[in-house]
Amino acid sequence: MKIKLIASISGSLLLARWKQTLVAAIGVTFSITMFIALLSFMSGLNDLLDGLVINRTPHVRLYNEIQPSKQQPIDASDQFKGSYNFVSSIKPKNERLQIYNNAAIMSALKKDSRVLGVAPKITAQVFYNVGSIDLTGVINGIEVEAENRLFLFKDYVTAGNYIDLKNTPNSIILGKGAAEKMLTNIGDVIQVTTTKGERISLKVVGYFQSGLQDIDKVQSYASINTVQKLLGESNNYITDIQIKLKDILLAPKLAKEYQSLFNVEALDIQTANSQFETGSFVRTLISYAVGITLLIVAGFGIYNILNMMIYEKMDSIAILKATGFSGRDVNFIFTTIALSIGIFGGLLGLLFGFALSAIIDQIPFITAALPTVKTYPINYNPKFYIIGGVFSLVTTYFAGYFPSRKASKIDPVIIIRGK
């Protein structure tokens, strides 16, 4: 088989019907362009939406949960041993939310090679005092630097400096919604009352905005020392240990391991945010389905064009076979035509897809719910370009294979005799 000669013949057939060839290439280009732009945008949107919660959620959270005692006094009675005992109105155990021996637990976690970082936290239920009105709220006591390193805390502080929480005694960063309800400005002093009736004055040093309005209306942040003072607890009082892992997929397994090892409750990120993962999966699935459908439609267009070309070139095919070209050669010629369309259209599609994604990335996206987001989100993952390029070749190959297979079986004698 003479490669150069076959390539020359393929080029001649392509140029002989250049308008149809151009239409087929444009179809592939358009499909790849929309495939890249759609997946880049939807993936960027998924990252943005998941980041609103997942970036602020530890991979594993250790805490104490107040639960009713599993063992009741009647279970210790010999008289009712071996019986099913039904006890109603069981009250929770009289215990604290504090994680005991938390310093040793955090020390052990920091030595674990699977752990990226550990951040302690205190969750305190409070009331924001606004004149004669008390607003329900939650103050999270955090180690500011650890919280920022592991959970990008400063990215959600929309006003003020996050480090002031550490440097300014008795300070608080209010949720944006809570600040608006209380008409509070930075530098103001607010009154906060705990569920035990303790009251303390806190200076507002910033606003926090997560993008979830229901959370921002109640949630605020203070340093761990401030919250310990607010609750009247000692310096070793911690209610939560937040763990960030090097591999998020290990979270369910490690949550069970830490729960058994440290005798505390453990919640992994997959369980805590399963609805977000489901939404991301569905959006990604829809994006791939639409993009692949576009490529398949383009493949049918190439198939129809090559089919018509074969019918119009029956004489040429008969002459080629009569002069010594085998059916395999003819098959190779038309497959080369299809792949040429796929390569040319695919390369242009990848280029235009990147350009369209870059244009979308510059379009302003201004919303009060997401103050840190300025433009529409785009994910420039190379995987999308690889998938688009490979799929364009596969689609065009099969679009050219079946018509070329038909052309390779043409009997030149019948064609010439008919003429």
Image (cartoon, helix red, strand yellow):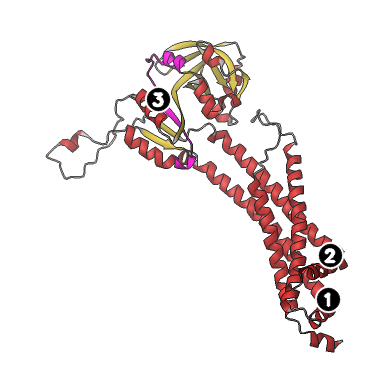
Q: Is residue 107 visible?
A: yes
Q: Is residue 345 left or right of residue 186?
A: right
Q: State which quadrant residue 410 falls in.
A: bottom right
Q: According to the image, label 2 marks what residue?
A: 20
Magenta segment: 224-250
Q: What separation in Å lies between label 3 and label 1 (alpha carbons)?
A: 79 Å
Q: State which mark lies toward you, 2 or 3.
A: 2
Outermost residue toward the left in this view: 79
Circle 1 is placed at which residue position?
313
Frontmost of labels 3 and 1 is 1
Using the numbered discs, state the Cα–Cα distance from disc 2 to disc 1 in whole angstroms.
14 Å
Q: Is residue 225 magenta?
A: yes
Q: Nearer the viewer, residue 308 or 239?
A: 308
Front residue of 258/185: it is 258
Query: Does the magenta segment cover residue 295?
Result: no
**Residue occupied by mark 3:** 239
- In terms of secondary structure, where does tag 1 sit? loop
Q: Earlier in the sequence, mark 2 or mark 3?
A: 2
Q: Residue 152: x and y, percent?
A: 56, 28
Where is the C terminus found, in terms of image quarters?
bottom right
In-image side of 142 versus 101 (left or right): right
